[in-house]
Amino acid sequence: MANSTTTTTTTTFFTFLLFFSTVANLANAKTHFHGFVVHETKVNRLCKTHNSITVNGQFPGPTLEVSNGDSLVIRVVNRARYNVTIHWHGVRQVRTAWADGPEFITQCPIRPGGSYTYRFTISGQEGTLWWHAHSSWVRATVYGAIIIRPRKGESFPFAKPNSDSVILLGEWWDANPIDVIREATRTGAAPNVSDAYTINGQPGDLYNCSKKDTVVVPVSSGETNLIRVINAALNQQLFFTIANHKFTVVGADASYVKPFTTDVLMLGPGQTTDVLIKGDQPPARYYIAARAYATAQGAPFDNTTTTAILQYEAINGTSSKPIMPTLPAFNDTKTATAFTTSFRSRDTPIVPTEIDENLFITAGLGINQCPPNANPKSCQAPNGTRFTASMNNVSFVLPSNFSLLQAHHQGIPGVFTTDFPGKPPVTFDYTGNVSTSLWQPIRGTKVYRLNYGANVQIVLQGTGIFTAENHPIHLHGYDFYVVAEGFGNFNPKTDTAKFNLVDPPQRNTVSLPVNGWAVIRFVADNPGTWIMHCHLDVHIGWGLAMVFVVDNGVGNLQTLEQPPQDLPTC
Ligand SMILES: *[C@@H]1O[C@H](CO)[C@@H](O)[C@H](O)[C@H]1NC(C)=O
Ligand SMILES: *[C@@H]1O[C@H](CO)[C@@H](O)[C@H](O)[C@H]1NC(C)=O
Ligand SMILES: *[C@@H]1O[C@H](CO)[C@@H](O)[C@H](O)[C@H]1NC(C)=O
Ligand SMILES: *[C@@H]1O[C@H](CO)[C@@H](O)[C@H](O)[C@H]1NC(C)=O
Ligand SMILES: *[C@@H]1O[C@H](CO)[C@@H](O)[C@H](O)[C@H]1NC(C)=O
Ligand SMILES: *[C@@H]1O[C@H](CO)[C@@H](O)[C@H](O)[C@H]1NC(C)=O
Ligand SMILES: *[C@@H]1O[C@H](CO)[C@@H](O)[C@H](O)[C@H]1NC(C)=O
Ligand SMILES: *[C@@H]1O[C@H](CO)[C@@H](O)[C@H](O)[C@H]1NC(C)=O
Ligand SMILES: *[C@@H]1O[C@H](CO)[C@@H](O)[C@H](O)[C@H]1NC(C)=O
Ligand SMILES: *[C@@H]1O[C@H](CO)[C@@H](O)[C@H](O)[C@H]1NC(C)=O
Ligand SMILES: [Cu+2]
C-alpha cells in the first residue's frame, strides 16, 4: 500500500544558520529538507478500497523528527485534484507566518499541479506536534507527527525512556471525506459521522477486515516507553486508555508539564499528550483503545472504538486474546474535566499580569433561517434551516481573492474589516435557555487588531445556542497559558480569584468545557494574521473562527519576514 517516496535526508548549513542566532550550541542545529508529494493512493479499510489523498503514498504521512532549534524546508507538490495547504500545527512560526498554512489566512491554496516550499524554524518547543492539511476536509487523510527532541547535549526533564512511539488518532469515513463535507455544505445539515476511528491509520480488531493490520506497540518488562498521543480526528474529542497500565503525563502540545498519573486521557482534535508507561504488568497483550467523548445532547456521533495492542516482548505470536480496558462513558464530563484540570506547567513561566487587551469571546453553534423561496434541499438542518456557528455572533467567512496575510502585508483594501468585537454584541445568559431570536449570527471576514507585544487575555465562553458542546479552540502562531476553566457563565467577580498565574499549562489548543468557559493569556509577540478556531472541522466550516492581526513591532526581529517568491496566488 504505502509506496513511500523520497524524503531528503538532513543536511547542515553552518553559514545559513549563523543568521539565526549567536547561541553557541546552535552549531548543532540542523536544517531538514523534505519533499511532500500530495497525491491519490489506494487505501483499503473496512473491507473497501478508497482513493485517498496522501503524502508520498503514506497513510498516516511521514513523521518529521527534529530537535529544538532545527529548521525545516519542506517542498509540497500538489498532484491531487483538490486545493491543498499544509499547517504545522503548534509550530510558533515566529516571523514566518507565510509558512503557517491555513488556506486564505496565510496563503492561497496550492492548486492541483502547483507547489510551495514551507521554511520555518522550531524554537523553544519540545515534545510532540503534528502537521495536517488545512483546506476543506483534506486533512482526514493528510496528516503526520512532528517529534521535537531536546537539543543535542540537552536531555528530557525526566529519565530517558527506553523507547519512543507515536500514536496518531484519526477518523475514517467509508466514503470520500470531501464528498461528505460537500454534501453537508449543500444541504445545510450536519455532515455524516465517521465510520471508524483509527490508531496510526488502522481501525483495529473491533472493526471488520481490520484484524490482521491492527497496530502493535511493543513493550519490554521493566522498561519505560514514551508515547506521543496526537488527536488527529476531524470532529471528535477522544478518550484514550491502555488496559491495566497507568500513564504518567509529562507534556502536552510541545510544552512540558509537572508529571501526573492517570488511567485515561482525553484529547480534543489538535491536542497532543506525551505520556510515559512502564512495562510493569504480567507479560501479555493489552488493548490500547480510544472512543468518543461526545457532549452535544442528542447529536449523532461515531460511537465505535479503535484499538491497537500493547504487546510484551516475552509474548510470542498473536494467539492470546488482548485484555480490554474499560473506557469512560461517552458523556463522562467528570473524567474529562478531572484530566484537563490536572495540567501544570513544569517550570514557573512568566505569565502576563498587566493585561492590555481583555477580550470576552463567545463560541457556539447557530441556525440560519432560509428565505421562503429557498430550495428545501439546501435547508435540511432542523425545521428547514441551515447550521452555522460563530464567535461573538460573527460567523467567519474566508476571503477568496487574497490571503489575509497578503492583504495585511500589502495593504490591499476590501479583503477584511478590523471590527471583530472584543465582547459579545449582546449580553445574555450564555449557557441558559437562549432565546431563538439570538440564534442567527451575522457573516463576515472580521479581524481583531493587536499591537505588537500586547498582553492579551481571552475569556472564551461556550454558549447553549442550539446545543452546548465542548469545543477544542486552537490559536495559530502562539502557545497560550490556560489560567482557568469552569462551567456555566464566566463571572469576573468570583472566577478571577481562581486564576492560576503561577504554573498554568502552555497549550495551543484548549478544551472549552461544554456549557462552560476557559481563560487564556498570551503576549502578542508574533506579527502576522493568526486564526483562532474550533478544531472540529465541522464547526470551522460553519464559521466558528476569528482572526487576530498582530502588527509588526520595532526593528527586524519584531517584523514579519518578506513573503517567499513561490507563495501561491489565488
Ligand atoms: C451520508 O449518509 C447517508 C445516509 O446513510 C447516505 O445516503 C449518503 O450517501 C452519505 N453521504 C456521503 C457523502 O457518503
Ligand atoms: C461487519 O460485517 C457484518 C457482515 O457484513 C455486518 O453485519 C456488521 O455490521 C459489520 N460490523 C461493523 C462493525 O461494521
Ligand atoms: C452505537 O449506536 C448504535 C445506534 O446508533 C447503537 O445501536 C449501538 O448500540 C451503539 N453502540 C454503543 C457501543 O453504544
Ligand atoms: C518465544 O519464542 C522463543 C523462540 O521461538 C522461545 O525461545 C521462547 O521460549 C518463547 N517464549 C514464550 C513465552 O513462549
Ligand atoms: C450519560 O448518558 C447516560 C445514558 O447513556 C445517562 O443515563 C446519563 O444521565 C448521562 N449523564 C450525563 C451527565 O448526561
Ligand atoms: C422546530 O419547530 C418546533 C415547532 O415550532 C419547535 O418546537 C422546535 O423547538 C424547533 N426546533 C428547532 C431546532 O428550532
Ligand atoms: C476581494 O474580494 C472582496 C470580496 O469579494 C471584494 O470586495 C474586493 O473588492 C476584492 N478585492 C480585490 C482587490 O479584488
Ligand atoms: C426555553 O425557552 C422557551 C421560550 O421561552 C420555552 O418555550 C422552552 O420551553 C424553554 N426550554 C427549556 C428547556 O426550558
Ligand atoms: C446576532 O446578530 C443578529 C443580527 O444583528 C441578531 O439578530 C442576533 O440576535 C445576534 N445574536 C447574538 C447572540 O448576539
Ligand atoms: C482553489 O483555490 C482557488 C484560489 O486559489 C479558488 O479560486 C478555487 O475556487 C479553489 N477550488 C476549490 C475547489 O475550492
Ligand atoms: Cu466546535
Image (cartoon, rainbow, N blue to C red):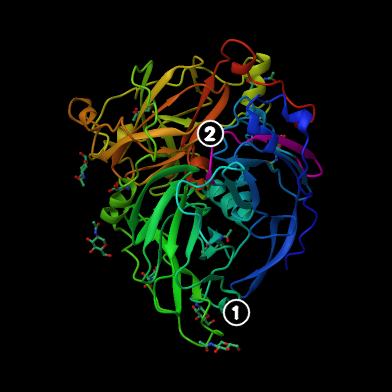
- Residue 437 percent location from the top left of the image: 31, 32
Give the mark nearer the N terminus: 2 vs 1: 1
- Residue 197 percent location from the top left of the image: 51, 63
Q: Which residue is mark 2?
A: 476
539 and 514: which is toward the camera: 514
**Residue 409 is drawn in which quadrant?**
top right
Ligand 5, seen in the image, is in the quarter at: bottom left
Q: How many marks?
A: 2
Task: Classify mark 2: residues with Cα within 10 Å, few (<14), some (14-19) or many (20+).
Answer: many
> Which label belongs to residue 212?
1
> Is residue 122 covered in magenta?
yes
Alpha carbons under labels 2 and 1: distance apart: 39 Å
Residue 59 appears in the figure: yes
511 and 79: which is toward the camera: 511
Residue lying at 27% horizontally and 31% vertically, measured from the top left = 499
Residue lying at 34% horizontally and 47% vertically, measured from the top left = 340
Q: Quadrant of the N terminus?
A: bottom right
Which contiguous range is marked in magenta?
111-127
> Which label belongs to residue 192?
none
